[in-house]
Image (spheres, rainbow, N blue to C red):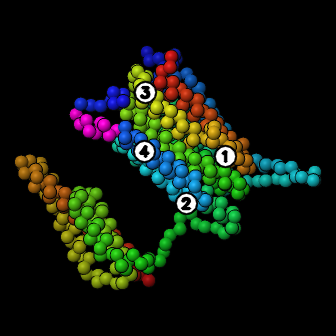
Amino acid sequence: MDIIILGQQLLGYIPLGDIVLYLAPLNLFMFAGSLAFTTLIAISRTETQVEAGFGTLKDREVKVGKKEFKIRRFLAIICGLATAGAMITGDLFNFTLFVCLIGIVNIGIVAAVKQVDVLDAAFQYGLVAMIAVLPLFGGAAMILASTGTISLLEILNIPTTAMMIFGSLLLLLGVAGETGVAPFYATKAEMFRTPGSPFLLIIHLSSLLVIVRLIEILLIINKPF
Amino acid sequence: MSASVLVPSVVSPIVVSLFIPAVFTGLIVGLIALMAIAYQKNDLSALILTDIVGIGMLILVAAVGTDLAEALILPGLVVELAEILAISEILLSREMRKTGKTAELIPLPVSLDMEVMTTAPTFLAIILIAYGAFLTGFTGGAVAGGGILFYVLSQRVRGVPSDMWEGVAGVSGIAWCLWLVGFLLFFVFPQYWLLALFLAAFGVFIKVALKAGLIGVLGREEFNKK
């Protein structure tokens, strides 16, 4: 392959018709990382959360039932797979769809918990995620309008215009709202407090990987150097 | 600003000049929805108002106006629907925890004695059938079939003579033959393509409409088996 993406050699691409998945060293590393974490989720078991009590030396154990645990584990696996898909996709709308899927599944993971404050936080997060769908899809549509394509391998060769910069700003705003990073991160921290299992960390890992991938995509679209 | 948008030469300049206003409209609709959600005191009303954000997204994606953008509208709508479902599950869980009662996943209205079933049926059925006839083809057949189904469901509440529907099944079969004849005409006598087109379109429309109506008949027979 002679295609150079952000200074790294393209290792290969998988053309599924119109939707092209491309593999470069950065993508491959994040893809492998999210798949490894998904495998860890698939083989995990329940844990008991221990809360210290005020005024006594006794600890309170908070457990999660087996059925609820299985549903959450299934949703966490879907979240991991969606993150893995978002890492190697070479298509802008495919990326936005995967980000939306991550947002929906994050809500689903905490949908059946028993703490009302976690549910409150999840509702606020869901509301912001729904509002963020507008700049997310709108930004991708504006990049489609200004470049004529949504394939990242094609956009690599198109010189930057003002509308592409505006579209990327909208895209950045959309991903920030959808995955719950600053300034919307407060509710996500509250969401994580539910007991159950350590794999709830996928809620944060998916946002981290998506932000890194988004920076790569923004560098591909607007070429600052 | 129009120099930064890729435009093929066959597009008229009026349409090109509408793109930037459409983008601003979409963004302003989003801002209005954001203000409305911020002023809401009720959680459920805030959730319903996010539908306006979905419309703003539709405006932005549809403003691009190409085939590719049209293919991207449906995933956006599906995502919006899925997010509303997920968040309403959260609200349901929260209310269940707060009040201690439980609710089913998909509540079904089993009793069909709603007011619309007695006051509206003929009018709505006629509107749906007329619109389906205008659309023709498979889509039109589905719309008209929906109208017939609605009429049958409403009549079930009041009682309907059953031998009317045997004739309906027969007409559906004959219309299906019209559809086949239309396609044969396309292959054998292509110079009569307009006649063949209308035969095929109206044939399949009548067939699908009456088939969908038959679903109502089967349902009615199921219900009467007490």
Which region is colored magenta?
A: B10-19
As helix, strand or loop, the secondary structure at mark 2 comes to: helix
Q: Which of the image's four quarters has the C terminus of chain B? A: bottom left
Question: How packed is label 3: few (under 14 Cα within 10 Å), some, or many (20 or more)?
Answer: few
Chain bearing mark 1 = A
Kind of residue at disc 1: Thr
Q: Which residue is mark 1?
A: A187
> Of circles 1 and 4, which is in front?
4
Q: Quadrant of residue A155?
A: top left
Res. A162 mark: 3
Chain bearing mark 3 = A
Where is residue A87? Give x, y as percent. Answer: 54, 32
Kind of residue at disc 3: Ala
Instruction: Tell me the distance, in whole angstroms, between the alpha carbons under discs 3 and 4.
Output: 19 Å
A75 relative to B119, above or below: above
Are labels 1 and 4 on one chain? no
